[in-house]
Each structure stands twice: as structure tokens, then as C-alpha cells.
Image (cartoon, rainbow, N blue to C red):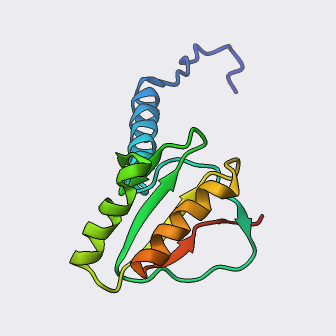
Amino acid sequence: MNFKKRKRASVEVHTSALNDIMFFLMLFFLLASAVANPNVVKLFLPRSSSGQSIPQQTINVSITKDLEYFVEKKPVPLADLYSSIEAYQRAAPDLTIILYADRTIAIENVVELTDIANKLKVKLVLATETKK
């Protein structure tokens, strides 16, 4: 038996490809999260334990905490909100409004939109997050 010390080869791990893979994964998830739901303005919604399905002919109306109104992600002043919703109603008579209201706004601002929906005889649904 030969017990002399042999010259061993050094072991190296090349991680240059790992950096590229991690960059592409990060880029993929960043792009995927940006297009998850492009028709909704980012808001903190109130929570609800029950939920219903969304009807087919809908428009999204959002009220931010700064009392800015959006119809389908387009900013609309409160004075023009009635005419903007009425234009959508002419295109789809069986229209439903999905209201995305920030949980910090006063109920008075939600009631203003409820009055507009009642005048136009349009269904109104309040969007909520599920309780965790």
C-alpha cells in the first residue's frame, strides 16, 4: 500500500450562473406582480367574511383616501362622476358598479356614489378583502 501524500485537485464552485438565474427570477416576479390586476387602484379595502361572484358587465369605481375618484383607472372629478357612469350605462344597460373605497374615508363619500347609482338605477357592490 502506498501511503504517500498525493497531490489533490482543488474543488471550486462557480456561482456566476446563479447570479443570472436569480436576476431573471426577480425580474419575472416583478413583472408578474405589476400586471396581476391592472384595472384596480391600490387601496386598503375593508374586510368581509362573506363574498360573492362578480357580474359580467361591470365598471370599477375607486375612491382613494385623498378623495380622488377613478372610473376604470381614469381620474374623474366628483362633479363629472354622474355623466361618466351614465355613459357606461348607455353602452351596457345591465351595468354593475364595483366600488373600491379606501377604508379610511368617511361613509358620506360612499353615500354620494350610492345616490348616483340609485338615480341611474344601477347595481352597486362594495369590494372588500377577505378576513385572514
Percent coordinates x, y for residue 44 in the rendering: 64, 50
Question: Residue 62 versus residue 79: which sits nearer the camera?
Answer: 79
Which residue is found at the position 76% from the left and 66% from the top?
A: 131
In the rendered picture of this protein, how many numbered marks are placed on residues? 0
From the viewer's perspective, is residue 58 above or below residue 21? below
Which residue is found at the position 40% from the left and 50% from the top?
A: 79
Question: Residue 131 versus residue 32: which sits nearer the camera?
Answer: 131
Percent coordinates x, y for residue 39 in the rendering: 38, 57
Which residue is found at the position 75% from the left and 75% from the top?
A: 49
Relative side of 49 to 88, left or right: right
Percent coordinates x, y for residue 114 in the rendering: 54, 69
Quadrant housing the N terminus? top right
Percent coordinates x, y for residue 59 in the rendering: 38, 68
From the viewer's perspective, is residue 118 above or below residue 12? below
In the current view of this chain or complex, which residue is farthest to the bottom? 94
In the current view of this chain or complex, which residue is farthest to the left? 91
Question: Residue 91 versus residue 53: which sits nearer the camera?
Answer: 91
Question: Residue 122 versus residue 39: which sits nearer the camera?
Answer: 122
Which residue is found at the position 57% from the left and 38% from the top?
A: 66
From the viewer's perspective, is residue 85 above or below residue 106? below
Quadrant housing the C terminus? bottom right
Residue 71 occupies quadrant: bottom left
